[in-house]
Image (cartoon, grey):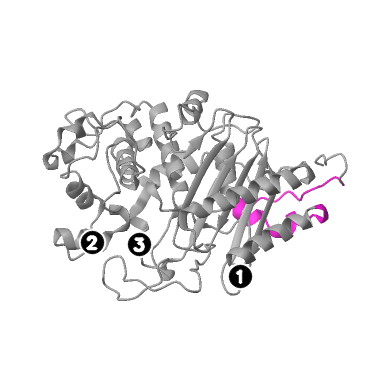
Amino acid sequence: MLKGAPDQEVVTEPAYRENLNEAITNGLSDIPELKALDHSVDSFMNFWALKGIALAVVRNDSLVYAKGYGKADASTPMTPGTTMRLASVSKLLTAVGIMKLQEEGKVFLDTPVFGPFGILKRFDPYIKDSNYYSMTVEHLLRHQGGFTTRGGDVMFSTLTFMRNHGLSEAPDAETLVQKQVSRRLAFEPGTWQDYSNFGYLLLSLIIEEVSGLPYEEYMQEHVFKPAGCTGFSIAGNYLKDRQPGESQYFMQPDSEPVPSYDGKLAEVEKCYGGNDITSLKGAGAWIGSAVEMARLVSCIDGRGPMEDILTEESVRQMTTWYDENTFSLGWVDTKPDGEWTRTGSFSGTSALVKVYPDGECWVLISNTSAWRGSRFSKNTAYLCKKLRGRFSHLMPRRDMFELTTEP
């Protein structure tokens, strides 16, 4: 029997022996004291015209609340175990993979990316700017590699890239890197920062090179499986690629169709074919559920009682705050007071992971584009802050993670 909050009825949960996404259902979070929370989420969804939201809350490494709101598709309710595209939250996952490899002694933050001692030295023949040879793994993690999006983000402008290079097919990662490293860097690595999806593609290739495994396989075996997570996978580009348990994605009603990312279709919904999401790899291609994302954070937070999959030193390196102009490793921001943030958004999805100074973690993922684009993350962060202030003390003292088998 699990202890309840002082003014609440004791909550006893059945001993499920299933995977996390199947075990955690909406019914487990139908708590009378939290009906007002549900109403607040519903109001937020109505205001922003969102089809569905999944929310998970962890306190002291215990899953105390998890619920899906709205629809995963026309006939399927959203659940806390519904998987959705995580967009740039994927970068946090990739950073964890790099830190695991550092713990294994296979790569280090100061390891050069290119050059005779570099991990990706196979691309050296295409390099014309010697500044590439000072680029390190840490530079890529902190968006300090020297790449810029001022002329457009190469990871989200595939058709333009194809036209510029006379390609009839969308480039694979090898071709894309070969072409990109032949360009001059915008700044010397380590002297500035500019948010770079391409840099995290390079980190994905680094994971493959030093581990000897495909990127997804390494992450599954060395990151997700040790954390007890079974539902993470790489997203597809089209509705036909939707995986079992994955939400459908939606645009706002007034959104205009666009050409497919490779030009083969004249008109597609932007969330289904407008971008080559699969090829983003560790920059933005992962799908996962709110509850499994919350569990993974519990395994990389340096707190107990759940056993971490990273050492204390790795957690410290990922979360140390330097200044307002320095990205953290994987996290988009880690403040001196212990508040950590990771956001992600593109067409059809928005994701937020917020760890507060007291260790409480809120994960919120939606399946609908918002007209504010990436700025919508500020609205979801404000929602979580407001809900936390009003309802955190009403959430029962329990651990729904215990409903699953041990990893």
Quadrant including the N terminus: top right
Image quadrant assignment for residue 110: top left
Instruction: Report the residue marked by disc 2.
Output: 160
Q: Amino acid at mark 3?
A: Asn
Q: Tell me what residue is drawn at x 58 percent, y 42 percent.
A: 354
Q: Let me know if residue 255 is in the magenta part.
A: no
Q: Amino acid at mark 2?
A: Thr
**Left of 101 or right of it: where is 355?**
right
Q: Position of residue 95 (x, y in %)?
A: 42, 37
Q: CA distance from mark 2 to mark 3?
A: 12 Å
Q: Sequence-wise, which precedes: disc 3 or disc 1?
A: 1
Q: Tell me what residue is drawn at x 44 percent, y 47 percent.
A: 90
Circles 3 and 1 in contact, beta carbons < 8 Å: no
Q: Tell me what residue is drawn at x 78 percent, y 53 percent.
A: 34
Q: Position of residue 293 (x, y in %)?
A: 55, 46
Circles 1 and 2 in contact, beta carbons < 8 Å: no
Q: Position of residue 121 (x, y in %)?
A: 19, 35
Quadrant including the C terminus: top right
Instruction: Report the residue marked by disc 1.
Output: 76
Q: CA distance from mark 3 to mark 1?
A: 26 Å
Instruction: Report the residue marked by disc 3.
Output: 275
